[in-house]
Amino acid sequence: MGPLLDCLRSVGGSAKPKEVSSWIARALDLPPEVTDPTIKSGANRFHNQVQWARQYLVWQGMIDDSRRGVWTLTPLGWKTHLDDVASRAIFLSTVKQYQETRRTPVEAEIATAVPVDDLPLDEQQEQSLLEVLQSLPPYGFELVCERLLREHGFESVSVTQKSRDGGIDGYGVLRLSPFVSLKVAFQAKRYKDVVGRAAVGEFRNALLGRAEKGVFITTGRFTSDAEMEAARDGVIPIELVDGDRLVTLFEDVGLGVRPKQIIEIDYAFFEQFRSQG
């Protein structure tokens, strides 16, 4: 929890979830054996722990959760600095509160232990969407990615013939201004596991003479080596879209999803009335 607050302060008060996880990993100099493993759902274990830390800070009023996909410090969060002892105290007090006020099995589950192998409640729907995408046939996934790129402003988007893709699943044009545009090639892979550096390198080789930029889309996630390869200087740049970011891109344009209002009980509000019996 402490490094999460430190991260948001250092970047001006708000950041996207993956940016926070990457910042913490760098700040704590965490090795790949800590940052790369997955949990039973297929999600990244380390990022899941960061998501749970954020959830506890939301319950404590230190992070504002009103804007989806962006973590923002509240005034309390700006001035709060937490060490491991203070973070543990927050966890224990939250568990106690939920044990005393829980009304449903879901709330009871929250209070059982440090939930490193479960997704936070507000992340479970995203995981369901990711599972739907992973269940599509390969060509169907390429087609839905074609639709996604078009919804996000790409022009002349098309999927290549299945037998002649040469390592490229489709093309599109990204117009930067009325006078400047880029030819972009994309690769769409339904992976549940990690995508390594070699796969990114092979995709870049396929781009030579065909496109000015590449977009690698996967329902899995990329290793740190793959991210370094994608950002390497002096070669064709490649944008990496992992499963978490892919879900956000679908949600941003309302593609394949419908909004649903959820009412959450503010247990802290009712605490002030408990002593008025």
Image (spheres, rainbow, N blue to C red):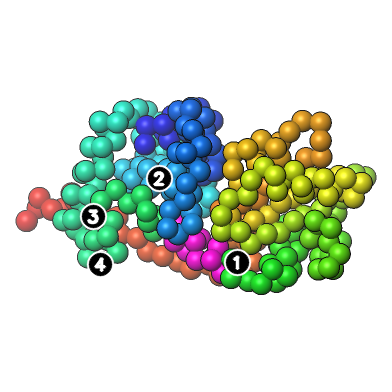
* Distance CA(mark 3)–CA(mark 4): 13 Å
Q: Residue at x 70, y 71 (%)?
A: 140
Q: Residue at x 84, y 58 (%)?
A: 166
* Distance CA(mark 2)–CA(mark 3): 16 Å
Which residue is label 3 attached to? Answer: 112
Could you tell me the amino acid type at mark 1? Leu
Could you tell me the amino acid type at mark 4? Thr
* Distance CA(mark 2)–CA(mark 1): 24 Å
Task: Using the image as rendered, state which of residue 15 and residue 138 is in the foreground.
Answer: 138
* Distance CA(mark 4)–CA(mark 2): 23 Å
Q: Residue 208 lies in what quarter of the image? A: top right
* Distance CA(mark 4)–CA(mark 1): 30 Å
Disc 4 + disc 2, Cβ < 8 Å:
no
Q: Earlier in the sequence, mark 2 or mark 1?
A: 2
Q: Which mark is residue 133?
A: 1
In magenta, the rendered stretch is: 123-133
Could you tell me the amino acid type at mark 2? Gln
128 part of magenta stretch? yes
Which residue is label 4 attached to? Answer: 104
**Is the residue marked by circle 3 packed among few (<14), some (14-19), or many (20+) residues within 10 Å?**
few
Disc 3 secondary structure class: loop
Q: Earlier in the sequence, mark 4 or mark 2?
A: 2
Disc 4 + disc 1, Cβ < 8 Å:
no
Task: Using the image as rendered, state which of residue 216 and residue 51 is in the foreground.
Answer: 216
Q: Which mark is residue 49?
A: 2
Could you tell me the amino acid type at mark 3? Thr
**Is the residue marked by circle 2 packed among few (<14), some (14-19), or many (20+) residues within 10 Å?**
many
Q: Residue at x 41, y 31 (%)?
A: 3
* Distance CA(mark 1)–CA(mark 3): 31 Å
